[in-house]
Amino acid sequence: MSTEKIDFLPVLLGSDANAYGLSRSFHSQYGIKPLVVGRTRFTPTYNSHIFDFEYVDNLGDPEVMVAALIKIAKRNPNKKLLLLSCGDDYVKLIVRNRERLKEYYELPFLDEALMDRLCLKENFYDVCREYDFAFPQTVQCTFEEHSNLELPFEYPIIIKPSNSVEYWKCSFPGKKKVFIANSQAERDAMFAAIYASSYKDTLIIQEYIPGDDSYMRVLNCYSGRDGKVKLMSLGHALLEEHTPQGIGSYAAIMSTYDPAILEKFKNFLEAVGYVGFSNFDMKFDYRDNTYKLFEINLRSGRSSFYVTAAGYNLAKYVTEDFIFNKPMDITYATNKHLWLMIPKQVLFKYLPNEQLKQEAKQLIKNGEYTHSLFYKPDFSFKRYLKLCLSYFNYFKKYKKYYGKKGLS
């Protein structure tokens, strides 16, 4: 635990697994309770005692958010306040209201111009070309052209929204976070279902990179206020979630180290002057031995607690930078650790790679593993019961949804 005098309060926007992971990081490092601000409480943050929770209805409205944050600041006049986002929409709201918030909060975020270059997927691919990142062959599909779209690559294909914030506001039968279409008939059915809803924004169509979940990699970074990278931690995904809402979210990660990958992303982040947390998703393409970059999230990832679990506390880096103003050199995470959101039995049943399975089992045998949500200082019977019910429900979820990324 830090020996610094604790005179600051982390304020976290969002109440999902990311919020819990960050809260746990602050609690374990500094022994303090962050303030989590959200519209509701999800299972990861249910009945937790390691943070205080403030409910704000309609938090996604910029005026509501700013007013709520200023009110919180005025209740804590003698503390330095550190504002962090656990969701993409809150990043945009904070950055676009920086001038109104900077009087009250330390804001470890990129500037608005850079955000606009990176937050929409079609803009991000232009950045990939500029900085020589490989990415899946990609085309954009607008509402007006979806009936006559010609593709320059073969099936199967990935279909996903460009505007994820607007997409989650819509509803239609068979809705999933990401779709895989194996033919034009399947593609056309997916287009029709999506555009029959309120979503009328652009869709991103990509070639499917072959390989199971274990071909995915995730990179979490922290860049300081000086624009220099302070922390880089690469994760080897073992298994993703497969529910309609959870497709693409990691369920098990084994930390790993690849200096070539880290150096490339370090150079990119410093070249663009990035500040704050960043999170990259990529997939190894065995056809040409390259990593194909999917996206950057302008915040810590939902699964980013794997970094803290491996011994590199995320809260420490941003706090020492923005609260204690300590100089830091870059840290490359090299410890081996297994992070889980699911039961071990589910991982071993659905992870097809035998070598990775044996590595994971050895880490468990050595005690080098962590479940994000089970934290001894946060124990209560009600929380434990809720988590156990959710935990064992994964057996049903994987049996029902594993490998099903079509419309039905």
Image (cartoon, helix red, strand yellow):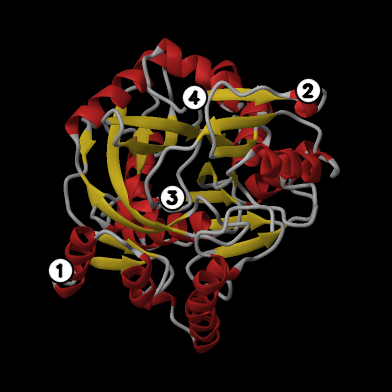
Q: Earlier in the sequence, mark 4 or mark 1?
A: 4
Q: Earlier in the sequence, mark 4 or mark 2?
A: 4
Seen at 79% across and 43% down, the residue is 64
> Regarding mark 4 in the picture, which secondary structure is present there?
loop
Q: Are marks 4 and 2 in contact (CB under 8 Å)?
A: no
Q: CA distance from mark 4 to mark 3?
A: 49 Å
Residue 63 in the image: above or below residue 373: above
Disc 1 target residue: 362
For this rendering, which residue is in front, 177 or 41?
A: 177
> Regarding mark 3 in the picture, which secondary structure is present there?
loop
Seen as rendered, the residue at the extreme top is 130
Q: Position of residue 212 (x, y in %)?
A: 38, 51
Q: CA distance from mark 1 to mark 2?
A: 52 Å
Q: Is residue 164 left or right of residue 338?
A: right
> Regarding mark 1 in the picture, which secondary structure is present there?
helix
Q: Amino acid at mark 1?
A: Gln
Disc 3 target residue: 7
